[in-house]
Image (cartoon, rainbow, N blue to C red):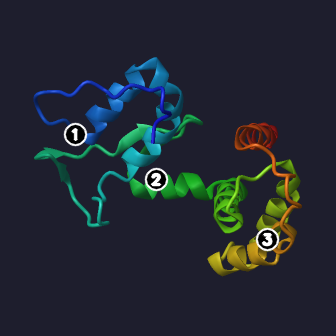
């Protein structure tokens, strides 16, 4: 969901495709910083509806699943997105591991968790990044097995900033 201080977009009289709605977000400077990164991924998957069924039209109009990812890679649908993600599996699996570990721990990650994230990714590489290896690595990790002492948790905003700094250094 958008941050609480972001106003909703004005509604239009005619139904808009997902691409048209996302273009409105990208045109709004408040929304653009996130939507520039997220939208190309989502639009490349636009042929899937909310239930995962394949479709070729949105609101009666053909779906255009082409876009450019934040790194400049052009994608034209799910096959191109898959290829782009597989070019650097450590980055994709690292991000996936961060998200899974956040869920498993029930808290945001911080710099103290990143050695465990890197170890899970490194160990999973040996199995071809199998999902079972990621899950096993997370549940065997120190952050999962030894929760931090009460009162030592890093505020979520600082934790996110720490992780963003680490990811930019990759």
* Measured Cα–Cα span from mark 1 to mark 3: 42 Å
Name the one closer to the observer, 67 or 115. Answer: 115
* Measured Cα–Cα span from mark 2 to mark 3: 35 Å
Q: Is residue 10 left or right of residue 95?
A: left
Q: Does 138 appear above or below 63? A: below
Q: Earlier in the sequence, mark 1 or mark 3?
A: 1
Q: Can residue 76 be seen here?
A: no
Q: Earlier in the sequence, mark 2 or mark 3?
A: 2
Alpha-carbon neighbours of circle 3 within 10 Å: few (<14), some, or many (≥20)? some
The x and y percentages for residue 27 are: 38, 20
What quarter of the picture does the C terminus occupy? top right
Q: Can residue 44 be seen here?
A: yes
Q: Is residue 8 left or right of residue 113?
A: left
Q: At 22% across and 39% down in the image, what residue appears?
A: 17
Q: Is residue 114 left or right of residue 44?
A: right
- The label on residue 17 is 1
Kindly indicate the quadrant of the structure image that contains residue 14.
top left
* Measured Cα–Cα span from mark 2 to mark 1: 21 Å
Q: At 70% across and 57% down in the image, what residue appears?
A: 107
Alpha-carbon neighbours of circle 1 within 10 Å: few (<14), some, or many (≥20)? some
Name the one closer to the observer, 127 or 49. Answer: 49
Q: Is residue 51 left or right of residue 39?
A: left
Label 3 belongs to which residue? Answer: 144
Q: At 28% across and 41% down in the image, what residue appears?
A: 18
Label 2 belongs to which residue? Answer: 80
Q: Does 52 appear above or below 59? A: below
- Callout 1: SS: loop
- Callout 3: SS: helix
Name the one closer to the observer, 155 or 49. Answer: 155
């Amino acid at each position: 969901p958008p941050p609480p201080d972001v106003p909703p977009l004005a509604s239009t009289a005619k139904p808009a495709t997902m691409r048209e709605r996302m273009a409105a977000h990208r045109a709004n400077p408040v929304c653009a910083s996130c939507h520039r990164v997220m939208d190309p991924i989502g639009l490349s998957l636009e042929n899937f509806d909310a239930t995962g069924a394949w479709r070729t039209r949105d609101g009666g109009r053909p779906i255009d699943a082409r876009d450019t990812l934040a790194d400049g890679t052009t994608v034209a649908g799910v096959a191109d997105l898959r290829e782009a993600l597989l070019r650097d599996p450590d980055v994709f699996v690292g991000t996936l591991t961060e998200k899974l570990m956040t869920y498993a721990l029930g808290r945001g990650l911080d710099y103290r968790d990143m050695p465990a994230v890197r170890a899970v990714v490194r160990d999973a590489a040996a199995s071809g990044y199998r999902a079972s290896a990621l899950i096993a690595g997370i549940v065997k990790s120190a952050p999962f097995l030894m929760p931090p002492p009460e009162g030592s948790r890093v505020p979520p905003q600082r934790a996110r900033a720490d992780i963003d700094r680490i990811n930019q250094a990759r």
